Image (spheres, rainbow, N blue to C red):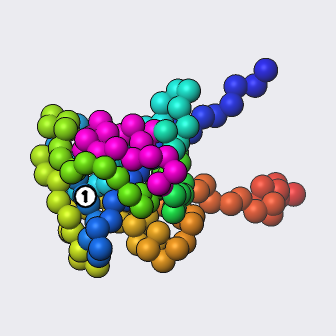
Amino acid sequence: MKKRYKQIAASYLILKKKDKLLLLRRANTGFMDGKYSLIAGHIEKNETARESIVREAKEEIGIIIQPKDIKLVHLMHRQEYEKPSEKRFCLFWLASRWRGKPAIIEKDKADNLKWFPTKKLPANIISYVKQAILKAEKKILYSEFEWKKKPAISRRSQMKSV
């Protein structure tokens, strides 16, 4: 049986309060440290995408979200920066309600949590996260990021000269 190529999936949480968006600055992880991102994490084995973001919200910022209170607002298919052979599906969820006051729980992975005006995102935000936020604001459900395709080879260039 042929082994299938697998892609990585992660969930991201968009929390909005009026015209502001909650962002977390990454630290000590080895990936995009010093840059702002949404609350996020990989989808674990035997877990749905919806369950993953409910779990991540509690683990990362200590809030409780009911699955019925989140809605998928964007799906991004992207290529990994440092490992171009890795492709990822990123699901962006918008929470309409939550319980608790957001606070950094994983202090070894983040050093700042701040509400930013949606129209004035920080310069040091992860670029694919910014793209997804902007697409979600425009109600665009799908986008691709940093997708590098091999150039198409025409049939003519494959033919040998006689």
Locate residue 119, reporting x and y percent.
Answer: 29, 79
Identity of the residue furthest to the top in this view: 1
Give the residue type at disc 1. Leu
Q: How crowded is mark 1: few (under 14 residues within 10 Å), some or many (20 or more)?
A: many
Quarter of the figure that contains the N terminus: top right
Above or below: residue 119 compared with residue 51: below
- The residue tagged 1 is 23
Quarter of the figure that contains the C terminus: bottom right
Numbered disc total: 1
Range covered by the magenta-colored residues: 52-70
Q: Which of 161 and 36 is in front in this view?
A: 36
Residue 159 in the figure: left or right of residue 63: right
Is residue 74 highlighted in magenta? no
Identity of the residue furthest to the right in this view: 162
Q: Residue at x 48, y 54 (%)?
A: 70
Locate residue 30, reporting x and y percent.
Answer: 23, 38
Locate residue 32, reporting x and y percent.
Answer: 25, 48
Q: Quadrant of residue 64?
A: top left
Main secondary-structure element of the magenta-colored stretch: helix
Residue 32 in the figure: left or right of residue 147: left
